[in-house]
Image (spheres, rainbow, N blue to C red):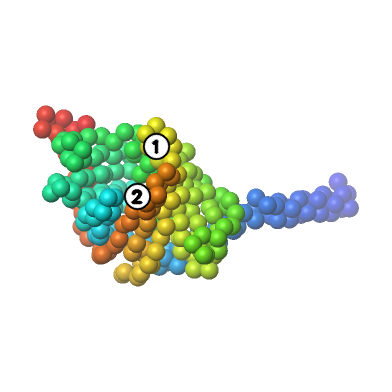
Amino acid sequence: MSKKLVAIAFAVVLVAGVLVYNSDAMKDRRAVRALAAQNIEARGGADAWQAVNTLRVTGQMDLGQGMHVPYVMEQERPGKMCLEFVFNEETAIQCVDGKSGWKLLPFRGRKEPEAMTEEEYRAMEGGVSIDGLLFSSVENGYKVGLVGKEVVAGRSTAKLEVTLPSGVTRWIYIDEETGLEVKLESTRMLRGQERLVETFYYDWQESDGLLIPRRQESRTQGDDEFHFVTVDSVQSNLPIDSSRFTMPATAGGGSS
């Protein structure tokens, strides 16, 4: 091949590379990476979050009809979480260990721990990570795409679509100015129908170098009321017994 042909071939490859780099898909990927980096930094930075192996959060939870109960949520890497609250003087528990989940719901007449259904487990997927949806999306196998821009609660936001390994999809809205989450959209099955759930984040405060929303308000499609969760205390790297996330044996001697 002559030097002239080599030069032409090189120029063609270079132009093609520039076109790919400047394609809409590449621009979206760069925008997603920039938004994820901005979000991580706004919430305290990668080093601060990577140093957290366990997290314990306490606060108040709105169950509807004016009923507010205290709760404790404990998390441990990777993907372990337990939510515990007291209702009618009985303790309810929902736990996942990264592979499966279990529940104890005495207020529904279920006095023994039971395995979560696949649908229940999938509904909690993506919400159990200590870091949040965007922090380790690549390592966790999440696919993140830029949907567009919207004004939410008076803030200019970038809307991202996050697809989890199971195929479950979440939509997260990032404040373009602060980098913090403004809203999260998810879906849940309610009486046999898939309903959209909107969660808004408020009152971001620093605790041990981590920025955490002290109030969340959620509404399910078809429900006119918002239900809140507040945060009173945040403690990181407390020792948590690994058995905390394992379903205890039932009175009949089984564990499933």
Q: Which residue is labeled 2 in the image?
A: 128
Q: Where is residue 253 in the image (x, y as percent from the top left)?
A: 12, 30
Determine whether, in the image, residue 226 is placed left or right of residue 157.
left
Q: x, y percentage for residue 82?
A: 25, 48
Name the residue located 55 percent from the left edge and 60 percent from the top edge: 151
Left or right of 78 in this view: 88: left
Seen in the picture, residue 146 relative to 179 is either above or below; the reply is above
Q: In this view, does 67 lie to the left or right of 133?
A: left
Query: Which labelled disc corresponds to residue 107?
Result: none
Compared with residue 64, is residue 180 higher up or lower down, i.e. above or below?
below
- In this orientation, which residue lies closer to the viewer: 8 or 215? 215
Regarding mark 1 in the picture, which secondary structure is present there? strand
Could you say where residue 123 lies in the image, as x and y percent from the top left? Answer: 37, 41
Give the amino acid at mark 2.
Val
| Front label number (1 vs 2) | 1
| Along the viewing direction, whichever of 148 and 5 lies nearer the viewer | 148
Whichever of callouts 1 and 2 sits on the residue coming sooner in the sequence is 2
- Which label number is shown at residue 189? 1
What's the residue type where badge 1 is placed?
A: Met
Whether residue 51 is visible: no
Find residue 197 and report its horizontal and vertical position in percent. 42, 47
* Up/down of 112 relative to 142, above or below: above
* Disc 1 from disc 2: Cα separation: 19 Å
Circle 2 — which element?
loop
